[in-house]
Amino acid sequence: MRIRGVIFDLGHTLIELPADPESLRREMHAAAQKALSHHGIRVDEQAFEAALERWTALRYGRWQEDWQEYPLVDTFARALAELGCPGTPEALLRETVRAFLAPQEARWRLFPDALPTLDQLKRRGYRLALLTNSGDIDHSWRLIERFGLRPYFDPIVISAAVGWRKPHPALFKGIAAAWGLPSEAVAVVGDLLEADIRGAHLAGMRGIWAAMVARTSASTGAIRPDAIVWTLSEIPAVLDRWADGGET
């Protein structure tokens, strides 16, 4: 069946993060601690880092099992409660999460061919949606608005807003239903085999692996993408070959 709609991931698919992971991690934790200290909440730096990363790792394990989204605000609340600061006001938690994410947000950059590719797909009449896993709704919207992505996509689905994460097939099927399209007429573009490509296949869709960050064509396990692209500008040609009955 001819593809008529394309679902895009956000991070590492349309935008990239050219930063040293370790220095960025330290900067993010320091920014969170500064925000807390500004409001009189002082916790041991190493203990706070350890608690936050432990709760994040625990919840990441649960994400992989139940596909449920656990908001960052709640993760911060649990880490602070563990360190003797229960009942931290939600407004302060949100301010701290925003401070924590700010160093990362400043480093995200659009892939150079992202907007030209989206423009081309729109001109060709494809329906476009954005589906991103994120523990913070506002964080995702700030990135979407900053890079001028909102006009290209309808709908935009953020996991923190709906409570489920990719690869939950209901997220993908819900978008197809909103378009009035069968799953077979939808393709998914993303950088993660487990979240994006597996989610596409569970929903009966084709999956295009955006390998710009992975920099490898070697997929692992049973998750095999229907196509691999090294730049976003290759996507229209993939869709053309599929329309002609060809394989990639």
Image: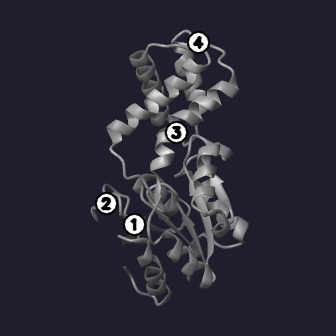
| Labelled disc at residue 219 | 2
Which residue is situated farthest in the top direction here? 84
Q: Which residue is mark 3?
A: 101
Which residue is situated farthest in the front direction here? 38
> Which residue occupies 63% across, 27% down?
93
Along the polypeptide, which appears first: circle 4 or circle 2? 4
Type of amino acid at the residue the image marks with label 3:
Leu
Q: Which of these two is toward me, 166 or 161?
A: 161
Q: Which residue is mark 1?
A: 225
Give SS at disc 2. loop
Q: Is residue 237 left or right of residue 4?
A: left
- The answer to whether any part of residue 3 appears in the image is no
Whole-Å distance between the Cαs marked 3 and 4?
21 Å
The quarter of the picture where the C terminus appears is bottom left
The crowd level at tag 2 (other Cα within 10 Å; few <14, some 14-19, many 20+) is few
Along the polypeptide, which appears first: circle 3 or circle 4? 4
- The answer to whether any part of residue 173 appears in the image is yes
Q: Which residue is mark 4?
A: 85
Q: Position of residue 157 (x, y in %)?
A: 64, 55
Closest to the camera, between mark 2 and mark 3, is 3
Along the polypeptide, which appears first: circle 1 or circle 2? 2
Give SS at disc 4. loop
Type of amino acid at the residue the image marks with label 1:
Pro
Q: Is residue 124 left or right of residue 113?
A: right
Whole-Å distance between the Cαs marked 4 and 2?
44 Å
Give SS at disc 3. helix
Closest to the camera, between mark 3 and mark 1, is 3
